[in-house]
Image (cartoon, rainbow, N blue to C red):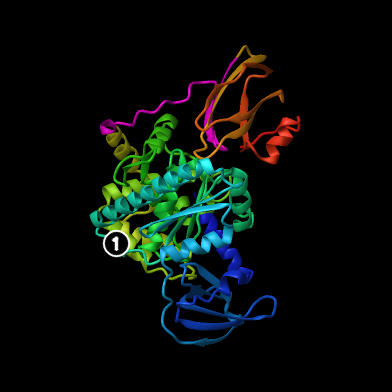
Amino acid sequence: MLIHRTFQCLQSAVLTALVFAGVLCFVGSQTFADTFEYVDEDGREQHVEARFYGAGQGAIALELADGSLSIIPQGALKKRTPGDDPVPLTPQEMLTRLEGEFGEELFRGRVEKQYVVGVVLTAPLPKSSERRVDANLLKAARYMGGIENMFQRFCKSMKIEHEDPKFPLVVLIFETDDDFNAYTTKHTGGNGLSAENIAGFYSPQTNYLYVRMSECYSFATPLHEAIHQQCFNTRVLSRLAPLPVWFSEGMATGFEGNGDKIQSDPFRLNAVYARLISQSGGLPPQMSWNDVVTTDQVFRGDIFAGSAYVHAWSMHWLLVSRFRKEYPEYLRYLSTLEPLAEESTRIRSARFEEIFGATPNEIQQKFAPAFEAAMKRFKPPADSEERPGTISRITNLAGVDAYAESDGFRMKVQTQLRNLSPLREMAFVVTVVSDSGSASQWYLPNMKINEFKLLEPRTLRGRGFNVMVQSTPADSETNARWSRGQLPTVGLRR
């Protein structure tokens, strides 16, 4: 979900002069653009047709016909021959490219207006599931179209200038968490949050949105990341510009959904964050709004990111709802920031204070009374909160609920699980580990689509516990190993 992690990856690429040659070498048969000749890091001469996108920090960014951005070191550029801008690929051309990249057996895709939605499968799909995958692709594509409509309504209501997307908007859904984790680690270079703690993300470089299939059960992550994609493809903001992370994330957290329905925009309270703030008695104390505005690092890493997101939503909500005149002016300022440019903390703080007439910390003082007043009118959606001793989560295509009662030394754990895969029968291994190191596993070799099972209660030593679920297609070699007793090693996953 987190755009700043991709920016960190890109900045690292700029500073180390990495060149993604496989992307840079593409020359579209229908494009007639500036031709850039350069020498890659292996000393080979390369030619690419692209539109000059920006320069800075010792690098040049080029916009290709598929909407991706390629970065080359300035010193590697040998010649630039002027031409027209590239002709953007059509959504159908983009779909054909993705089918070639992932292979016909492991990819299914659909075009819906400007969106190209694809599923990256972990194994060949049974013929009986083809209709299911088509139906789910259509559902996802139409959901993305709904996001686009809501974002445009928000822009119009705030008098924010925006354009229609000119490139295909790609959404890639990874069927399994393992495949998503492997791809994410490779894409980010291991920088920022660990892959296991990333539900999905939008890449300013590829212009793709990547998400786990498990996240498509609630659609919260696709919604969040699609707002990032909309911001950059409607030219509201520029990719690779030195944008404050708090603003990008605050904007995205302002939109909230309930399943596959989009029910809220930045003017309203976000039910999740409103509940967190109410239950905690206020904003997280680890940082202030001055910290959030000036220090993008608070959004990176596994420790402070959660608190930073609460602050980002809070600040964005207050500015949208109480600073209706200043907010568009601030956004116009952000839209002037150039790709690959640098902006000092001093300038960032000065511009914020100049436009809003106060420091972030001074504005933060206005949040508590505004929030309390809004909560009096707020009707949160019906949502079952977890009771003490319960863990409920969606992970690895499983909806799992685990409940434990403890006498202080031993606890009885009751677990139930549903197969959330919309495509195929799955095998699951559920592992519960107590705070004393005691563990127990349940193996479910074959669960039908949407099947629900109540698992046999187990007793473990300890007073607290965590639950982990691993899954694989029921007809996979991995499940064959599990059936032979070679179950996954017991361990904890955050």
**Rendering coords of residue 71 (x, y %):** 55, 72
Does residue 61 sit above or below 325 in this rendering?
below
The image quadrant that residue 332 belongs to is bottom left
Does dot 1 land on a helix, a strand or a loop?
A: helix
Which residue is the site of mark 1?
329
The image quadrant that residue 351 belongs to is bottom left
Q: Residue at x 36, y 46 (%)?
A: 255
**Rendering coords of residue 213 (x, y %):** 51, 43
**Rendering coords of residue 79 (x, y %):** 55, 87
Decide whether residue 198 is among the magenta residues. no
Q: Quadrant of the C terminus?
A: top right
Q: Is residue 202 visible?
A: yes
Few, some or many residues within 10 Å of mark 1 (<14, 14–19, 20+): some
Q: Which of 350 and 176 lies nearest the eye of the viewer?
A: 176
Q: Which of 118 and 150 lies nearest the eye of the viewer?
A: 118
Q: Residue at x 43, y 76 (%)?
A: 86
**Rendering coords of residue 91 (x, y %):** 42, 63
Q: Residue at x 65, y 17 (%)?
A: 458
Q: Which residues are magenta?
A: 376-405
Q: Residue furthest top?
A: 407
Q: Could you tell me the amino acid type at mark 1?
A: Glu
The image quadrant that residue 236 belongs to is bottom left
Q: How many marks?
A: 1
Q: Is residue 288 visible?
A: no
Decide whether residue 379 is among the magenta residues. yes
Q: Is residue 380 left or right of residue 129?
A: left
